[in-house]
Amino acid sequence: MSRANRPIGVFDSGIGGLTVVHTLRRLLPGESIIYLGDTARLPYGTKSHRTIERYTLQMGQILQRFEPKLIVVACNTASAHGLLALQAASSCPVVGVIEPGAEAAALVKGPVGVIGTLATVSSASYDEALRRRDPDKVIFSVACPLLVPLAEEGWFDDPITDAISRRYLNQLPFEAKTIVLGCTHYPTLLPSLERTRPGTRWIDSGEVTAQSVDRLLQGSLGYRTESARGPLRILLTDASSRLREVGERFLGEELGNVELVEP
Amino acid sequence: MSRANRPIGVFDSGIGGLTVVHTLRRLLPGESIIYLGDTARLPYGTKSHRTIERYTLQMGQILQRFEPKLIVVACNTASAHGLLALQAASSCPVVGVIEPGAEAAALVKGPVGVIGTLATVSSASYDEALRRRDPDKVIFSVACPLLVPLAEEGWFDDPITDAISRRYLNQLPFEAKTIVLGCTHYPTLLPSLERTRPGTRWIDSGEVTAQSVDRLLQGSLGYRTESARGPLRILLTDASSRLREVGERFLGEELGNVELVEP
């Protein structure tokens, strides 16, 4: 198979990365996508650097079997702790969600807020990626451990989600008029986040990553040449009935067959 | 070493089981305890039967290395999905938290409510264990996925925890005047739960399990004969800085050295 016709591999710790697949399929409907979610060991956001790096490498190995033209690490926590190791170990290009998110945030004037999991925030990966582009950038970060379970519970537009968002976001000074959604689950909570902090410019790290994938394909990697809508295969390391229900809300279409793989 | 002087192995998916260790050390201060938390793969409560059973067997194998006189599965989800397999594979007795919890609930008159993780509630293990003791028992169950992350965030006594508890507990009819705390994290949330549903009798599955361990030692297993306070070793499959802080709140004493083991 010519390289351009090979699939794009998308990896996430669970099902949050399906929000990135949703955007990829809107922007690049012809591409073939293989999604791999490590649902047997999710979430990564509360775990240590060493463990997240090890899991990311194992997931990358599974995706390599499908000879992807590109791997997208559609998880902020795995991008923060495992991207460099996976890039070193992979025979294809590997992109994470943090560099595109930081690039978009660096273009904005004024202080920037970053929200994410405990592991993403404590890695300071956004701070580093932003300061590489603008050494004087003022950055405020806050870890929001309850937002992932809230999104997975499906309380997307809910007074309890409002109250929790308020508690977390009030820790960011009001000068931060731009906030990076540093977790692929968070875009599903935007109604609550926007109510909590109206007038904010939100940067969806998954959305800007899908745009940077488009630019990579436009370059040397190439678009898939078949004209039909690209297929989507979903591989998970564990499948509970709940995942299907939540996954379809994240993907915005039916999940179809889910294949189980050993982690 | 004589059997009575061997350690008690306590296994949990994470650190919630430290609430059971806390009770064991109060009731049985002379016992030596080895605690194993599968923090690299927690939580189990959202995962499938097959995966939880596999993890429980692997954790049991690690504990067997220490030649325990008894293994306590201090996790409701692992007890619901992995206890039978672990009992079949182990050379020492293995007790879970569901049978003692159900036993205590069966002694109470009237309908019983059960709260737990998605996996515990969907297993119907409490229903089955209760009906074995009282076929006419009326049982209501509700899964409360956000209570574990709330306890781990440390919002023990908090208006947000009150609001979330209210939403879950209001799904149980008011005739259920006795509610089983079917997850070892939940006792830490009792202030909120009690405010939400005053006058309820709460059954702490971990507390009654510690009492049944006492009865087992009184029988053939025997108490440790050394008079000094028993040692506590903590093994985890992953150690993040956050775990120590939350773990000490669950255990009610300092964690001391934490040893890392491969899952």
Image (spheres, coloured by chain):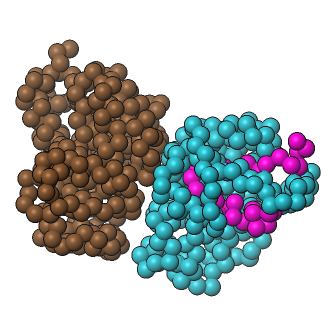
Chain colours: A cyan, B brown
Q: Residue at x 64, y 41 (%)?
A: A59
Q: Quadrant of residue B89?
A: top left
Query: Is residue A124 at all visible to an observer of this figure?
Result: no
The range drawn in magenta is A1-29
Q: Is residue A186 toward the left or the right of residue B88 in the image?
A: right
User: Which of the 4 quarters of the picture holds residue B239?
Assistant: top left
Give coordinates of residue A31: x percent, y percent: 81, 56
Q: Is residue A22 magenta?
A: yes
Position of the N terminus of chain A, as image quadrant, is top right
Q: Please give the name of the residue rendered at 51% of the width and 73% of the height, measured from the top-left corner.
A: A156
Q: Quadrant of residue B216?
A: top left
Residue furthest out toward the front:
B135
Give whichever of A30, B71 is nearer the camera.
A30
**Residue at x 7% of width, y 27% of height:** B219
Q: Position of residue A46 (x, y in %)?
A: 49, 51
Q: Where residue B68 sits: x, y (%)?
A: 25, 24
Whether residue A215 sits left or right of residue B12 in the image: it is: right
Question: For residue B90: magenta?
Answer: no
Name the one closer to the observer, B228 or B114. B114
Task: Return the x and y of residue B221 as percentages of the image width and height.
Answer: 13, 24
> Left or right: where does residue A22 sit relative to residue B57?
right
The residue sitting at 57% across, 52% down in the picture is A14
